[in-house]
Image (tube, grey):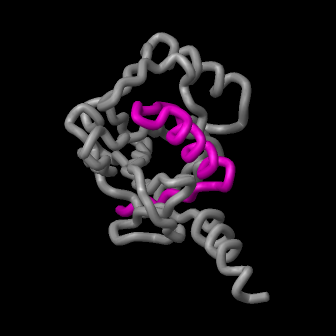
Amino acid sequence: MTVEVYLSENAFIGLLVSTIEVYRRECFGILLGHSTPDRVFVDFAVPYQTATRKFREVHIDWKRSARVEEAVRGTSRWELVGDYHSHAMYGPLRASTELSTEDQEYFTDRTVGIVVAINDIRRPKRWSYSQGGIISGAINGYSIRIAAYAKRNGQIDKAPIICPYAVGFMGQRRASPRAG
């Protein structure tokens, strides 16, 4: 069964801001929303402030993470539906959205994982859906590709992302000067 991941405007902006803020290092955070058996609705992307960020990896304190997860369960109507992290360009090595072996090892069943690849880019690029259910575009000299994965019954599969805000609104906003 293919799981679709719907990103809200808040989640999309949260992913961009936390990825761009620490660019050249990786970021990590949790995804809050709700889910059905075939869809995950991501309403918020919340970055971990105490994550240890490196150029090619990010580490979190699992005790702190457990505290955060318990606080979310006890104080909000949102579910913890997964987590996200970024892969940043490192020297001439371009970042990709592929899961590393370590990413797969820590992936929890019945959740989604989002990987945001960030690379330098010289020309603007409109936000669009790419092959494999990825969304991609450019902002402020950064090329961004966002991919989602879902783990069900021990199997990790790519999950198509649907984000009307990024692809619809941002694409229309850029096109509007030609319409006038």
Q: Quadrant of residue 147?
A: bottom left
At x 42% / y 18%, what residue is drawn? 52
User: Relative to 145, is 72 on the left or the right?
Assistant: right
Between 38 and 170, the one lying in front of the other is 170
Single out the residue that lies furthest toward the right: 180
- Where is residue 25, by image quadrant? top left
Q: Residue furthest bottom?
A: 179
Name the residue rendered at 30%, 50% in the picture: 96
Q: Relative to the observer, which residue lies in front, 17 or 11?
A: 17
Q: Which residue is located at x 41 percent, y 62 percent?
A: 134
**Position of residue 22 measured from the top left corner of the image (x, y, whole percent):** 50, 32
**Residue at far front of view:** 122
Residue 171: quadrant of the picture? bottom right
Picture coordinates of residue 113, whole percent (x, y): 41, 43
* Placement of 124 over or under 153, stated as above or below: below
Q: Residue at x 44, y 60 (%)?
A: 122
**Quadrant into which the C terminus falls:** bottom right
Query: In which quadrant will I find the N terminus?
Result: bottom left
Residue 87 lies in the magenta-colored region: no
Q: Which residues are magenta?
A: 1-30
Is residue 28 part of the magenta span, yes or no?
Answer: yes
Q: Is residue 28 above or below residue 133?
A: above
Instruction: Please tell me whether residue 171 is drawn above or below residue 17 in the rendered image.
Output: below
Q: Position of residue 99 (x, y in %)?
A: 28, 44
User: In the rendering, at what x and y percent does residue 158 appear?
Assistant: 33, 57
